[in-house]
Image (cartoon, grey):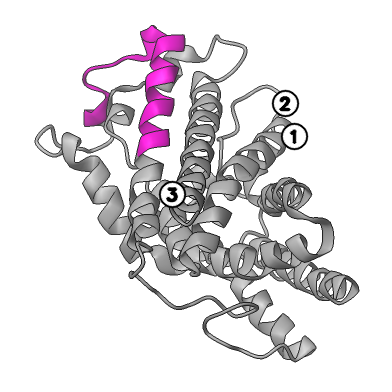
């Protein structure tokens, strides 16, 4: 079984990387930077997010694994809310706001001079709706979860179960995060994830993406396991991409250009790490309580 999982995993990864990187190249042959692209071109390039799920389907066709919708070894496309599984969907909605808002708060603590009470005006956000930005991100994230599903249907729906079968849980979680981060490399190299104005561009950004994907990937994987569905991971991914935050409207990162490291990146790393630890401790306590109830 381990050898079989390994072969299937290799097929999947080759397809996922080759399809996505080819798409990123074909849609941006001129090597245009992300910030210089029109919204239409950004959307076109971003369709590469669908490639992991396409690779998932192609791998199942090649390996003849079948297309069960639910259960072990399935596509995990069902949604079940009974037996308190709705909690995992709720967490998928809340976690991105928690770690993003916390990251911005930490960034402001590191560099208070970034605080700009009118910065949101330059972003085209009305003062009457600035405090509704997390709600807006939640709504747009859920609506836009189709693209995030393209990634999560592949990473969480296929890659992670196969990695677990090949190398065990902890090594799989670490390896899966690094793979996911490296998959983003073409986008990181054009400034999609962290921009271009930072020391060590783009190599430092690729390393940062691997770290971020490993930390967030643990949460996404657990949400998928606990719910038996890839949809909570897709929702969390999409909402996170939509930046559910109020504080971002008051942070002018240009005021921190003289610092050796980005306060935003440090804040995100610390916040995601903190939320992950609390998340894991809470789950562990919940599992222990369940065991005691059945003793």
Residue shown at 26% from the left, 43% from the top:
134
Dot 1 or dot 3: first in sequence order is 1
Q: Are marks 3 and 2 in contact (CB under 8 Å)?
A: no
Disc 3 designates what residue? 241
Identity of the residue drawn at 38% across and 14% down: 114
Residue located at (81% from left, 76% from top):
8
- Residue 79 vs 251, above or below: the answer is below
One can see residue 190 in this view: no
The image quadrant of residue 15 is: bottom right
Gap in angstroms between the C-alphas marked 3 and 2: 24 Å
Query: Does residue 156 lie above or below 173 as drawn?
Result: below
Is residue 262 among what the camera can see?
A: yes
Give the residue pinned by disc 2. 200
Q: Which secondary structure, mark 1?
A: helix
- Where residue 97 sits, quadrant-wise, is top left
Task: Tell me where residue 86 appears, x and y as whole percent.
Answer: 33, 62
Which numbered mark, 1 or 3, is in the foreground of this view?
3
Q: Are marks 2 and 1 in contact (CB under 8 Å)?
A: yes
Q: Secondary structure at mark 2?
A: loop
Tell me: 87 left or right of 155. left
Residue bounds of the magenta highlight: 98-121
Q: Quadrant of the N terminus?
A: bottom right
Magenta region, mostly helix, strand or loop? helix
Disc 1/disc 3 C-alpha distance (Å): 22 Å
Judging depth in this view, the residue of 219 and 150 nearest the camera is: 219
The residue nearer to you, when weighing 80 against 38, is 80
Numbered badge on residue 203: 1
Q: Magenta includes 115?
A: yes
Q: In this orientation, which residue lies closer to the viewer: 61 or 259? A: 61
Labels in figure, total: 3
């Amino acid at each position: 079984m381990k050898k079989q999982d390994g072969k299937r995993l290799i097929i999947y990864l080759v397809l996922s990387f080759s399809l996505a990187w080819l798409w990123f190249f074909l849609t941006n042959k001129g090597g245009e930077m992300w910030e210089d692209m029109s919204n239409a071109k950004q959307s076109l390039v971003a369709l590469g997010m669908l490639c992991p799920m396409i690779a998932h389907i192609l791998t199942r066709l090649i390996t003849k694994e079948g297309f069960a919708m639910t259960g072990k070894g399935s596509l995990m496309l069902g949604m079940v809310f009974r037996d308190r599984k709705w909690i995992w969907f709720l967490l998928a909605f809340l976690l991105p706001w928690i770690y993003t808002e916390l990251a911005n708060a930490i960034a402001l603590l590191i560099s208070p001079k970034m605080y700009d009470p009118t910065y949101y005006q330059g972003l085209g956000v009305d003062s009457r709706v600035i405090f509704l930005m997390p709600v807006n991100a939640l709504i747009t994230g859920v609506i836009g979860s189709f693209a995030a599903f393209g990634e999560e249907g592949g990473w969480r729906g296929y890659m992670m179960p196969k990695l677990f079968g090949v190398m065990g849980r902890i090594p799989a979680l670490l390896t899966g995060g690094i793979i996911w981060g490296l998959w983003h490399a073409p986008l990181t190299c054009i400034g999609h994830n962290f921009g271009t104005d930072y020391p060590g561009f783009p190599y430092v950004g690729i390393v940062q993406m691997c770290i971020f994907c490993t930390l967030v990937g643990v949460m996404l994987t657990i949400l998928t396991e606990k719910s038996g569905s890839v949809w909570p991971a897709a929702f969390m991914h999409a909402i996170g991409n939509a930046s559910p935050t109020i504080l971002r409207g008051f942070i002018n990162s240009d005021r921190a250009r003289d610092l050796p490291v980005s306060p935003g990146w440090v804040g995100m790393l610390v916040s995601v790490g903190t939320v992950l630890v609390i998340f894991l401790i809470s789950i562990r306590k919940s599992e222990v309580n369940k065991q005691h109830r059945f003793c």
